[in-house]
Image (cartoon, coloured by chain):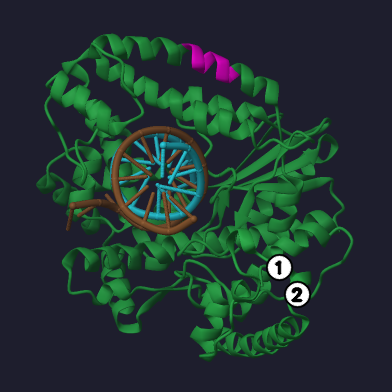
Chain colours: A green, B cyan, C brown
DNA sequence: TATAACAGGACTCG
DNA sequence: GCACGAGTCCTGTCCGT
């Protein structure tokens, strides 16, 4: 149970070859559970009751140390625990076999435990002085914005409170209410952008929010997590997401800013040790490629084989114009539809994203599905499959149950339908990069290269490598990632390197 | 009355 | 009424000590 936390401390001293982790097995059997604890699992899979450890040691202030627990009681607890674990193992492995998940479990997920433990243990160096300096820059502007906002409002209030901000905007300043939340006025970025022209306070608030987020989450938040060695050791969770992706926490290194130049500067704080560099590889359009493969859509497969810009290509097909004549607006609309398709598109969702009418959105979608006819068929088929089986699968037989498909509530059912479409796409992409991670880890060891995998960001891997081995690692990473699996179309990988995470773009 | 736990809303990423 | 998948920060409220 949760062997990664043990490997984390031990694997330098012990050569772990055979290990098992039932939390992983349980995750594969049902990835939608919120946590995997042995007493719960005993009930679910064996219909047996194991008293939780809490019953033995109590909780809160009165928690006993194990050495103070009655020896007789402790002994019987441990023996029950062990026999139950063995029975549970047998049961879970039979499910894994029945569901054709042996390869996924033994060749991907279990080896990956060690890879993630190694990433967590290695951590990543952070340039604290740089972060502090950047923080001071942001704070200076925040102080000015704060004063500016108070002067527009006419009084001081807590800008971070949506409740108070709502009162200022919609009661004091009488700005038009665009949208409401369950509890009051909506003041999110989408709403604020629509209010931009109506009062100077709006731009100040948008700017304040951006800088506040950068400061609290990515500067102050990180500084407190830096170890004595000057590193940050994030946790990589392997049994959280419903689709098979990994997640990262404390801190989350999978959502470091990149979309604005200002935020992107945070990435300059992440650095390798001396004489080392970062080598990064990222999959280009991996989810759309997976969709092309799963649906077998020849038009889309052909587009990827030509290696044309997929959004421009889509725009030219959907709007019936020559590739060269696609306008930036057409491309950006086509891009939104491509994204939407992967999420399990709805005319409402697309209309919100593009800020167009529902009717227009529907026309875009209809044109799209006329172009990519097999995608249309695939969308209908996968929902049907989900309904019939109760679950959908990825290319490596990762499974997600979708009880929402049976709901009498239209909204819930609609959600289930989008999940049925999105999960095989997002989940198969997760399968692919996990295979690449396991292979990279093994190859770096076998070839005795001075490189270590340190980050994964869903479609991107970052390796920390001694400068002398950069070229070899680039070559290796590119090959391993592009050939992790063989689809009906090529996987494209972009490789970069640099002396900070910012530069390894 | 002070504090902890949790939900909601806002923001970040792929 | 909402796009799919996550995590963190802040506020405001609820609840037990």
The x, y position of residue A186, in whole percent, is: 22, 36
Measure the C-alpha gap from mark 1 to mark 2.
Answer: 8 Å
Q: Could you tell me which residue is drawn at 75 percent across and 54 percent down?
A: A118
Q: Which mark is residue A180?
A: none
Residue A176 visible in the shown view: yes
Taking the image as shown, residue A320 lies to the left or right of residue A266, namely left
Q: Quadrant of the C terminus of chain A?
A: top right
Q: Nearer the viewer, residue A71 or A170?
A: A71
Residue A201, quarter of picture: top left
x then y, percent, for residue A191: 22, 32
Q: Position of residue C1 (x, y in %)?
A: 18, 52
* Residue A478 is a magenta residue: no
Secondary structure beneath label 1: loop
* Residue A138 sits inside the magenta stretch: yes
Which circle's residue, 1 or 2, is located before the other in the chain?
1
Please state the chain letter of the residue tagged with numbered disc 2 in the rendered image: A
**Label 2, on which residue?**
A19
- Circle 1 marks a residue in which chain? A
B4 to B13, vertically: above or below: below
Residue C3 position in % (x across, y down): 30, 53
In the image: residue A459, left or right of residue A316: right
Q: Is residue A358 above or below residue A179?
A: below
Q: Is residue A99 visible?
A: no
Judge from the rendering whether residue A472 lies leftward or rightward of residue A203; answer left or right: right
Outermost residue, right side: A13
Say if A131 sits above or below A320 in the image: above
Q: Are marks 1 and 2 in contact (CB under 8 Å)?
A: yes
Numbered range of the magenta stretch: A134-140
Q: Which residue is mark 1?
A: A3
The residue under the point 38% across, 13% down is A145
In this rendering, position of residue A402 left or right of residue A142: left
Residue at 80% x, 58% y: name it.
A9
């Amino acid at each position: 149970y949760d062997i990664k936390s043990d490997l984390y401390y031990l694997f330098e001293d012990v050569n772990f070859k055979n290990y098992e982790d039932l939390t992983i097995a349980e995750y594969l059997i049902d990835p939608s559970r919120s946590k995997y604890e042995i007493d719960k699992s005993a009930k679910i899979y064996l219909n047996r009751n194991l008293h939780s450890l809490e019953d033995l040691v109590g909780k809160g202030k009165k928690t006993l140390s194990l050495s103070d627990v009655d020896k007789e009681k402790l002994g019987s607890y441990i023996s029950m625990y062990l026999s139950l674990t063995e029975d549970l193992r047998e049961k879970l492995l039979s499910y894994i076999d029945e569901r054709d998940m042996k390869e996924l479990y033994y060749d991907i997920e279990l080896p990956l435990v060690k890879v993630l433990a190694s990433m967590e243990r290695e951590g990543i160096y952070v340039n604290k002085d740089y972060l502090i300096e950047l923080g001071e820059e942001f704070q200076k502007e925040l102080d000015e914005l704060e004063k500016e906002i108070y002067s527009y409002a006419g009084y001081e209030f807590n800008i971070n409170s949506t409740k108070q901000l709502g009162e200022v905007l919609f009661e004091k300043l009488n700005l038009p209410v665009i949208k409401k939340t369950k509890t009051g006025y909506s003041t999110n970025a989408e709403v604020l952008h629509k209010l931009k022209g109506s009062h100077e306070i709006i731009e100040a608030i948008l700017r304040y929010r951006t800088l506040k987020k950068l400061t609290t989450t990515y500067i102050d938040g990180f500084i407190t997590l830096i170890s004595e060695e000057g590193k940050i050791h994030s946790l990589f969770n392997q049994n959280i997401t419903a689709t098979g992706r990994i997640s990262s926490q404390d801190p989350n290194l999978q959502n470091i800013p990149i979309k604005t130049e200002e935020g992107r500067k945070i990435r300059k704080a992440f650095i390798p040790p001396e004489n080392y560099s970062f080598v990064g590889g990222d999959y280009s359009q991996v989810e759309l490629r997976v969709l092309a493969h799963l649906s077998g859509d020849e038009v889309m497969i052909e587009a990827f084989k030509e290696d044309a810009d997929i959004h421009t290509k889509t725009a030219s097909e959907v709007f019936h114009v020559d590739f060269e004549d696609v306008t930036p607006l057409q491309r950006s609309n086509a891009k939104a539809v491509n994204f939407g398709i992967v999420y399990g598109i709805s005319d409402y969702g697309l209309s919100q994203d593009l800020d167009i009418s529902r009717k227009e959105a529907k026309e875009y979608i209809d044109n799209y599905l006329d172009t990519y006819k097999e995608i249309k068929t695939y969308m209908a088929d996968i929902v049907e499959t989900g309904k019939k089986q109760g679950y959908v699968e990825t290319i490596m037989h990762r499974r997600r149950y979708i009880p929402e498909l049976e709901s009498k509530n239209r909204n819930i059912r609609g959600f289930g339908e989008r999940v049925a479409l999105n999960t095989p796409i997002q989940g198969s992409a997760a399968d692919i990069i996990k295979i690449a991670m396991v292979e990279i880890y093994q190859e770096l060891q076998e070839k005795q290269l001075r490189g270590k995998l340190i980050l994964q960001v869903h479609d991107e891997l970052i390796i920390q490598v001694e400068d002398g081995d950069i070229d070899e690692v680039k070559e290796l990473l590119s090959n391993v990632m592009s050939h992790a699996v063989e689809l009906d179309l090529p996987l494209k990988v972009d490789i970069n390197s640099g002396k900070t995470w910012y530069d390894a773009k």
